[in-house]
Amino acid sequence: MLRKLLAVSITAALALNATNAAAETVSTERHKVSVNTITDKLNKPWGMAFLPSGELLVTEKSGTLRRVTRDGAVSDALSGVPSVVDKSQGGLLDVAVDPNFADNQFVYISYSEADPAGGEGTSTAVMRAKLSDNGLTDGKVIFRGAPKYKSGAHFGSRLVFAPDGHLFITLGDRYSAMDDAQTLDNHHGKVVRIKPDGSVPADNPFVGKDDALPEIWSYGHRNVQGAAIHPTTGKLWTVEHGPKGGDEINIPDAGKNYGWPIATYGVDYDGSIISDETHVEGTVQPHYYWVPSIATSNMIFYTGDQFPAWQGDLLVAALKGSHVARLDLEGDRVMHEETLFEDAVKQRIRDIEQGPDGYIYLITDDRAGQLIQIKPAE
Amino acid sequence: MLRKLLAVSITAALALNATNAAAETVSTERHKVSVNTITDKLNKPWGMAFLPSGELLVTEKSGTLRRVTRDGAVSDALSGVPSVVDKSQGGLLDVAVDPNFADNQFVYISYSEADPAGGEGTSTAVMRAKLSDNGLTDGKVIFRGAPKYKSGAHFGSRLVFAPDGHLFITLGDRYSAMDDAQTLDNHHGKVVRIKPDGSVPADNPFVGKDDALPEIWSYGHRNVQGAAIHPTTGKLWTVEHGPKGGDEINIPDAGKNYGWPIATYGVDYDGSIISDETHVEGTVQPHYYWVPSIATSNMIFYTGDQFPAWQGDLLVAALKGSHVARLDLEGDRVMHEETLFEDAVKQRIRDIEQGPDGYIYLITDDRAGQLIQIKPAE
């Protein structure tokens, strides 16, 4: 398989050099950067994660998982991916690599899953499996959102590991079930926290509480599609889509209510306000928000050496804006926002990751979806 | 005088209705507002302050001080204003009204003052005087920036009273003397704190220190033209012009160094960086900053009843941007920035104040300078 991949890689690299070496130099406030389209052979990619080898695992919404090299070689579809409901916003979504992958070869995928009982509802599920050369084996569903619900929208979902080894799964309110985000007997509009084997940590905030699902970490979210662990505090940060405006960054604390749908900064398309209620007793204010919406996807804290002036900054990718918002942080506090790459990236940005090389990688949400590498300009 | 003013007022109001009733309705994220040009009969106004009567005192850079009613009646020039050096950025600058004005009738003006000894240098001075119907009497210079220095630029200056009765005066680095901002034997690039009679508070941070001027409160500033007291913490907040970018909000603490010119976020016109040094040991990071510069003038914390969703927000006026930046605060933390009035205001905004009626007032930096009233739309 390695030999095969290598051969694919070389072929793809040649093809890239021949037809697709799209690179653009962009000046930003603190760095001059080169924006390079590595490949456009991805079909609606959604999530990506780096393996220790430096290769990427990339999901495609239709239900395929591929290996992609940083030269742009895209593998055949890997086997062992479960059946997904590829409809509206649903499909194969995020992928994460176990922090101990070298020892256990575990990877995690999130997806919209049909009702095993045969009903019309779907929900976000998470499978853990072992990654072999050809694909996934020993798949086990470690989380299954409840209830199954008939909606094609707002599945979340992003997978991130906390420094203590717990797995955070960010979820959506399933749109028409938005009121569920305020009650604890379901997973709609929640961030959940589990152990990598699917069991519930004993110190989760609602363990042992009546009428509360024990996986819940925080609630009152709308559709959380971005998450990252702060590199010095180790705390979870999330970013969620607001209602036609009001995209929010939160720092979800255990057991806290982030307000949706009873408190929001969202505004309607004509600029009029949806609700007077931005502050509701018992709910936490966002840490930062955007009106109008930029349609936030994923985010990272940049910690690499390639862009020294961005170290510690929060980079938030935007679907609608086709840009990356750089938030310059001092401690947790946002001091400044810069809009990056908006003229150099033409497609909706679906995921952002930092490579082992310190470069920044983007994938775009298109049938000719791109993998884009950001590196310092020569 | 009152009768005369009333007559002027009625005449002006009629003129206004006849020729100049420029009002524009603007939708913002949280409020629909009416932007009304009350008068355009101000000649390069710089500062304004409300008297307990509800009238405004307005400075014009050329050296005139006027009363202006909220109907747009502009008085003749008041007498008793000292001679000012109206050249480049210098002239008659800010005006403040004593918190105990009803008892003592004191007002304060800042201005660029020639060297009394006859040299070519100038510096920012502050005069306290009593306001009578016709003008100022009993004028006393309570602060005189040192040294006098030959430059037409960066005089500061904004005057604000702390809740404890001390007067803050914000200053500039005089441009070519920028390095002075890092040493304490001069007033360039400083915020100073004095008593209203000009004496030095015993608890100022550098009192009794060798080679330090005792009026200094904080240092390492570039050109501070905006200042306001936070309505709940009572702390001083300032906003200063950065070098072609890097406008900064700071919360100046006693004795602290805010970094100019050794640390800056400023970028050059072509987008390249001026300095790699944004973080320098011993200097305080800005609380928030803008790149590119919006050219910040003054700012207020909005506390009125007319715009409930803006209560507690910081409104920062911009010269270059001809807009007001609304910073939505949670505690001290900026959660969101909205750009207000940018299409409705055509001129550089030089000062912003909240009226006793809860409306927001702007003056613009033009030979046909405007007084603009912002109120809720019908």
Image: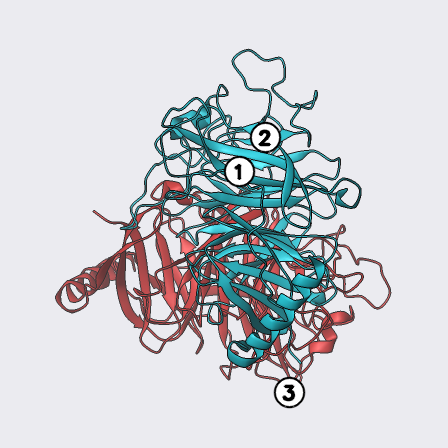
Chain colours: A red, B cyan
Residue for badge 3: A118
Labels 3 and 1 share a subunit = no
Q: What secondary structure is found at the residue carrying circle 2?
A: strand
Q: CA distance from mark 3 to mark 2?
A: 86 Å
Q: Quadrant of residue B86?
A: top left
Place of residue B182 in the rendered image (x, y in percent of width and height, measured from the top left): 45, 25
**Neighbour class for label 2 at 10 Å: few (<14), some, many (≥20)?**
some
**Amino acid found under the numbered disc labelled 1:** Pro
How many marks overall?
A: 3
Q: Residue furthest top?
A: B210
Q: Are marks 2 and 1 in contact (CB under 8 Å)?
A: yes
**Amino acid found under the numbered disc labelled 3:** Gly
Place of residue A262 in the rendered image (x, y in percent of width and height, measured from the top left): 74, 72
Residue for badge 1: B82
Query: Pointer 2 indicates a residue of which chain?
Result: B
Nearer the observer, disc 2 or disc 1?
Answer: 1
Q: Image point 39% across, 75% down: which residue?
A: A44
Nearer the observer, disc 3 or disc 1?
Answer: 1
Q: Image point 71% across, 68% down: which residue?
A: B306
Residue B141 is marked as: 2
**Residue B326 visible in the picture:** yes
**Amino acid found under the numbered disc labelled 2:** Val
Q: What secondary structure is found at the residue carrying circle 3?
A: loop
- Residue A138, compared with residue A306, is above or below; it is below
Q: What secondary structure is found at the residue carrying circle 1?
A: loop
